Amino acid sequence: MTGGAGGLVRAAVVGTGLIGGSVLLRLRDAGLDVAGWDPDPATRRYAAERGVAAPDVLEEAVAGRDVVFLGGPLPTLATTLTQVAGATDDRCVLTDVGSIKADVATVAIAQGIGHRFVPGHPMAGADRAGLAAADPNLFEGAAWVLCPAPTGMAAFRRLAALLIDVFHARVVPMSAPEHDTAAALASHVPHLLAGGLAGAVQRAPLRDAVLALAAGSFTDGTRVAGGPPTRTANMLLGNRDRVLAELDVVRSFLDELAEALGAGDAEALTARLEEARAARSALGHRSYTTHRREFPAAAEHAGELAYLRELGAAGGHLSGCRVEAEAVSYTAHLPAGPTLG
């Protein structure tokens, strides 16, 4: 394999809801040979109406493919992975789009497919669901976590090139446990907070009056509460221990805010709000340094793996991955300040 799109030209997507469907449509628009499969016959018919091959049999959809993306409800991913692995050959790269990584990574290793399964999580979504809500541009510029493993570096390289070249995503390499810890605070706890605020309003004596007054702060703060409850519950339960740990951190900060407010301590309240403002401001005003790193293509991969995981843990991402006969080169971006070993 050399150069663009990782050499992955025949693709399949299993589970074509919002995320899987958006992957499917982007691959179609990029001109790749792509097939989709979903357990719902109506969804398969809808995919066919949008110009995508959608066989009735999963094995037919994935046979002979270079890469397969696995979607669908989190509790079904392990079973789907087993089924797809058995229906594809050893050269086929497998990945998923679920929001929790450690468990599915463990399943892949136990099944002996860690060399071709790369856990993935595109950090994009919407408060709608289903293929009808899918958007082929959903991942443009989005962070897309990939979890490289010692035996799966070749698969990681191929998949990273595809995500960069076709989806224009920012590939964030991380270990599966570090992803689950970071995602708990970046994504999962916000669902609880949004649910808590929206749920409190639902029970409020002046519910309708509150909703009549609700503006941007309420709308922004509760957006994800509009998503399918079962999907959100699966995500939270799947990462329960980490979510509860990070929720404790948030609760502690809320307690500090409440204590300052209760004491009428304007200085302490302002200081805590300034801390929060700093993190919020950093979302849109982060500066990055760019560097290029090269590793031997066929040598032992410990140094390459360590570099990639350190890059992701430091808040960095990849915008380029090119594999030649002798070397693999990465174009990487690191937040101003951190340096890599």
Image (cartoon, rainbow, N blue to C red):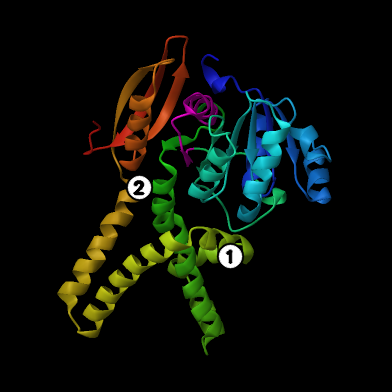
Q: Is mark 2 on a helix, strand or loop?
A: helix
Q: Name the residue rendered at 33%, 26% in the picture.
A: 303
Residue 130 spot, x, y in % from top left: 69, 52
Q: What element carries label 1?
A: helix
Residue 154 on the magenta span: yes
- Quarter of the image with the N terminus in it: top right
Residue at the limit of the structure toward the bottom, as seen here = 205
- Nearest to N terminus: mark 1 or mark 2: 1
Circle number at residue 95: none
From this viewpoint, is residue 173 visible? yes
* Closer to the camera in the image, 211 or 13: 13
Dot 1: within a 10 Å radius of its alpha carbon, few (fewer than 14), some, or many (20 or more) residues?
A: some
**Number of marks in the image?**
2
Residue 39 spot, x, y in % from top left: 77, 49
Residue 245: name its quadrant: bottom left
Instruction: Determine whether 301 is above or below 24 in the image.
Output: above
| In the displayed structure image, the side of residue 95 where residue 102 appears, left or right | left
Q: How far apart are marks 1 and 2 (CA)?
A: 24 Å
- Quarter of the image with the C terminus in it: top left
Residue for badge 2: 284
* Closer to the camera in the image, 276 or 285: 276
Circle number at residue 226: 1
Instruction: Determine whether 13 is above or below 179 in the image.
Output: above
From this viewpoint, is residue 135 visible? no
Q: Give the range drawn in magenta.
A: 141-163
Labels 1, 2: front one: 1
User: In the rendered structure, which amino acid carries the disc numbered 2?
Assistant: Gly
Instruction: Determine whether 32 is above or below 253 in the image.
Output: above
Residue 228: name its quadrant: bottom right
Residue 13 on the magenta span: no
